[in-house]
Image (tube, coloured by chain):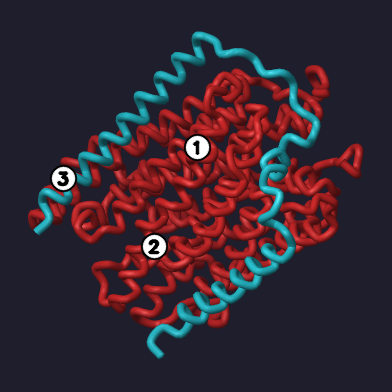
Chain colours: A cyan, B red
Amino acid sequence: MYFPYFITYMSIGLVISIVVFIWALKNGQFRDQQRARFLPLEDDLDQTAAGTSRVSRYEMYGLFLLALAGLGASAAVLIYSLFYAP
Amino acid sequence: MSNPSPTYQTAKGFCLTSAFWMIVGTLMGLIGATELVAPDLTKNIGWLVFGRVRPIHINIVLFGFVTPGLLAAAFYYFPRLLKTELYSERLGVVTVVAWNIALVAVVLTLMLGYTQGREYAELIWPIDVAVIVVFLMVFFNFIMTVKQRTEPVLYVSVWYALAAVILTACTYALGNIVWRPSSGALVGIPDAIILWFYGHNVFGLLLTPLSAGVTYYVIPRSVRAPLYSHTLSLLGFWSLIVVYTHIGTHHLLQVPVPTWLKVIAIVDSVAMVIPVMAFLINIWYTAKGRLGEIHADIGAKFVFTGTIMYFFVSIQGSMMSLPDVQRVTHFNNWVVAHAHIGVLGFAGMIALGGLYYILPKVTGRPLYSRLLADIQYWLVLIVSIGFTVVLTIAGLIQGNGWLNGETVYRILPQIHPYYVTRASLGLILVIGAALGFYNIVRTLFVRSGEAVT
């Protein structure tokens, strides 16, 4: 066969995943999902949160602008590539 | 908690490991970036030539900085989410020591020129074995902790961390062809397939699930709200397992690999939108209206920023798997930009966030300096964005050159300014890493400040 290792890995991975999934199903891991949402909070909680300051609002605007710049750059490249596709 | 005063020695050890190797990894990146603009700088210094520095940079950032940072948080949240003690703190500490010995061996062997010469799989066989062993040690500790849990439901972070560790142990063994110690390689196209399957998964199936695990723990806790949907998080987890495991061939679309494999790789790369958006929608809805709490916690701030970067790097990843897009973006610095958003902007940010989130908890004291951590946050953020911008531009110039049949030497002067900027940004990152290391060492070892209740 041309690529036995790859197919072996995919098959083993698939079998293990299915076995674990079935275990999870039978073990009740997909039941009681409402309680599961709270699991990280069942521990002792941290100190009370501080409020939002003006500086942190500016930080948020800065992050938003950076995010927009990144998205714009990605969109430009996609358009460019598709436009010049042979 | 069944154990009223856990020591968290393993988590602390991985914190320190991550902080230290971040300096080494970024320094190697800086040296490599500098050599690209000043090739004669390290002339006649054999152990510092670009071909040796680059693999050290990649391996150390992956296994020295980001993975230990994420594992530090995992070793903290595992006992807490499972309401038990860590199975063996001693085994954890031994793992940390073995991990660091392996990292020293990585640097020394690569500097001395001992390499198997396959990209991302350069390490020689004894170190390959050591890497697999330490991952198995971590997995054993995790799975035994799961076995002795008192909480019946496995929270999604536990699923992610378990999958990351065991999948990486398997992926690493297979990708490095450990059954052939002398070469660590197959021959021809099958080797290319398996190498890129490995090259993609060693990042994607290690850093992505570990980062998701940390995020699913830190964000609900820091905003003091339950997760938006645990069902959605499990949907994201299982879809990640299904689609992420075989997309590596999208690195080989220009290569004569079987078409069916390329189709699987492309379709699953696009299908990655499902686990990515399941994760992001869940996290962002959990944090909705609670950004003040995120800003108040430096760990959560790092982590939340990492999720924004994850959005970009994932959208990019899906786009880049399309053959038409690859005509411009492949074989040039665009991919390097993508890698830096992924490893530094996404996983690196979340690793640092995990560290800063757990440090006050594991030490029982506040962080030594919130200001230093904030400065590091902004340095890492600026450098991540900066790398993305300059390397994307350089990549587009190169991609445009390939597309139009331009010769390489005519393109090089055009990308020179961006290479210089990249090296300067690297310097900023090394400074950020050093500040972080100082802050973390002071927090861990210097008893100052008031105790955290």
Q: Nearer the viewer, residue B189 or B306?
A: B306
Q: Is the residue under label 2 in contact with that under label 1 (CB below 8 Å)?
A: no
Q: Dot 2, crowdedness within 10 Å: few (<14), some or many (≥20)? A: many
Q: Are marks 2 and 3 in contact (CB under 8 Å)?
A: no
What residue sits 40% from the left and 54% below the top?
Answer: B49
Disc 2/disc 3 C-alpha distance (Å): 24 Å
- Distance from label 1 to label 2 (Cα)? 23 Å
Residue indicated by mark 3: A80
The crowd level at tag 1 (other Cα within 10 Å; few <14, some 14-19, many 20+) is many
Please give the name of the residue rendered at 74% of the width and 26% of the height, measured from the top-left corner.
A46
**Amino acid at dot 2:** Asp
Q: Which residue is mark 1?
A: B306
Chain that bears disc 3: A
Mark 1 vs mark 2: tell me if same chain: yes
Labels 2 and 3 in the same subunit: no
Residue B347 image point, x, y percent: 52, 44
- For the residue labelled by badge 2, is the local secondary structure a helix, a strand or a loop? helix
